[in-house]
Every structure is written in structure tokens, then in C-alpha cells.
Amino acid sequence: AHHGELHQVADGPARPAPVRVPLPHPSQVQPVPPVPPQALGQELEQSFGPQGVFRFDQRAVSRQGVPDVVAQTLVWAGLPVDFGPFFWAQAQPGRPVPTLAELAAERGVRPAADAGSYLVMGNDFGRQLCVQYGTAHIVAVPLEAGPGGQPAVPQFVNSGLPEFVRCMAMLGRMWRLRYGLTPEQAGRWTVDFQAQLVALDAPALGSPESWWSVLLEQMWDGLL
């Protein structure tokens, strides 16, 4: 509650939070079938415009250990370049997609012992959003090692990069519609948003600690 009180003081009268509606059970939601990377690219362009999407060249993704689905998605679909306050792409033309260890070294911070096992897609202005080698999940991890070089526990974001890209395109499409809504309308928007998330990638909301669950929590609390 303390955080909420501070927020109210800072922002003047807080709008009353909408009544939270529980998540639909995945069995109640028809999953959206996957689409090829070119179609993902079209979804991104519809949400962010052609200038707002960064696509990687083949050389940038041709490094050992990069799963094929990740390489294809980065080359043909791309990533949103600058979608504040949610995601900024690690977009540096002509450079290979970096591992977390490489990015930490470049920024002069100490990487965790497992930093070589993450491929950095971008950041959420706090943590790096990465492909985790072995699972190909998208997870959020800090750039810097914890005390004593300890790796942090990765926070689950999405089942894979195609799912992440689609969820971002969907949020990009819907986010513009959230401005200026009454609390009741914002509540309906959030119900729609969480149902679409479950349809695109049910595991994204599979735990209250996941990245998308935390975001959803902030939406329900009226902080976003």
C-alpha cells in the first residue's frame, strides 16, 4: 500500500482502480495459431510503423548457438525499436546480437557466471530481455551480477521470441487505445488485453511473478 500512497501524493488524486477481473483459464481461450516470421513483421509494422521496427541482417544472427527460430524472427520480423515504457531493442546495425556477457563487458560491469548463456534482445529500462540458451524462452535478467558474482533468477517473459514479438505487436496496437479512458473503460481494456495475452502465449501469465503478470498488475492498479 505504501507505494500506492506515494504514487497518489505524487500525482494528485489517484483514479480509483478498476475492479480486477480474474484471468481467463487457458482452456476458455482459443489459442492464436502461430504465423511465419514475415507475417509477424507485418504485425509489428502495423503497430509501430516501418521506421519503428529494427530487422537484423543475416550476419548479425549467424553466431553459434542462436536457435534457428530466433535468427529467422530477428531477420524477417524484427523487434520494436523504442516502445517506452515497455521495451527498447538492442539495435546496433551491423553488429552481432550480443550475449549478456559481451554487453556487460562493453558497459564495464561485472557479468554473472551464466551471462554467456543469454542472447540480448533489448531491455525494459531495468533488466535485459534475452533469449535463454537451452530453453529458447524470453527472460528478463539484470546486466550486472549479484553480490559475489551470483547469477539472478531469470524472470519468465514469453515461451519464445515469436510469442514475445506478437505480444509486443498486440500491446503496441492496443496501448494507443488506453489513453484518456475512465477507470471503468480502462478495466474493460485490461480484461481484453489479458485475454489476448493468454490467447497468444498462455505461459506468459502462468505465474504471478512473470514479466507480463507484473505489467498486468500495474495496469489493474492504475499505475500504467
Image (tube, rainbow, N blue to C red):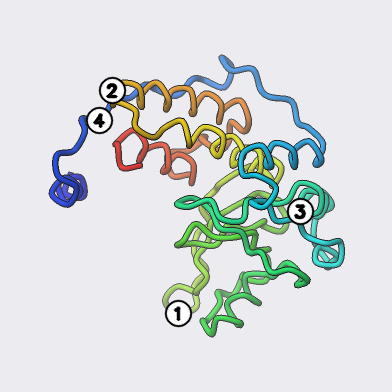
Which disc number belongs to residue 148? 1
Q: Residue at x 81, y 48 (%)?
A: 76
- Nearer mark to the viewer, of 4 and 1: 4
Vertical arrangement, residue 120 with respect to residue 186, above or below: below
Cα separation between marks 3 and 1: 34 Å
Cα separation between marks 2 and 1: 43 Å
Sequence-earlier tag: 2 or 3: 2
Return the x and y of residue 82 as percentages of the image width and height.
Answer: 56, 55
Cα separation between marks 4 and 2: 6 Å
Q: Residue at x 50, y 74 (%)?
A: 144
Sequence-earlier tag: 3 or 1: 3
Q: Nearer the viewer, residue 32 or 153?
A: 32
Which residue is label 2 attached to? 19
Which residue is label 4 attached to? 17
Cα separation between marks 4 and 1: 41 Å
Cβ–Cβ under 8 Å for marks 2 and 3 = no
Cβ–Cβ under 8 Å for marks 2 and 1 = no
Cβ–Cβ under 8 Å for marks 4 and 2 = yes
**Mark 4: amino acid:** Ala
Cβ–Cβ under 8 Å for marks 4 and 3 = no
Cα separation between marks 4 and 3: 38 Å
How packed is label 4: few (under 14 Cα within 10 Å), some, or many (20 or more)?
Answer: some
Is 141 on the left-hand or right-hand side of 182? right
**Mark 1: amino acid:** Gly
Sequence-earlier tag: 4 or 1: 4
Which residue is label 3 attached to? 74
Q: Residue at x 70, y 56 (%)?
A: 54
Q: Nearer the viewer, residue 165 or 137?
A: 165
Q: Nearer the viewer, residue 186 or 126?
A: 186
**Mark 2: amino acid:** Val
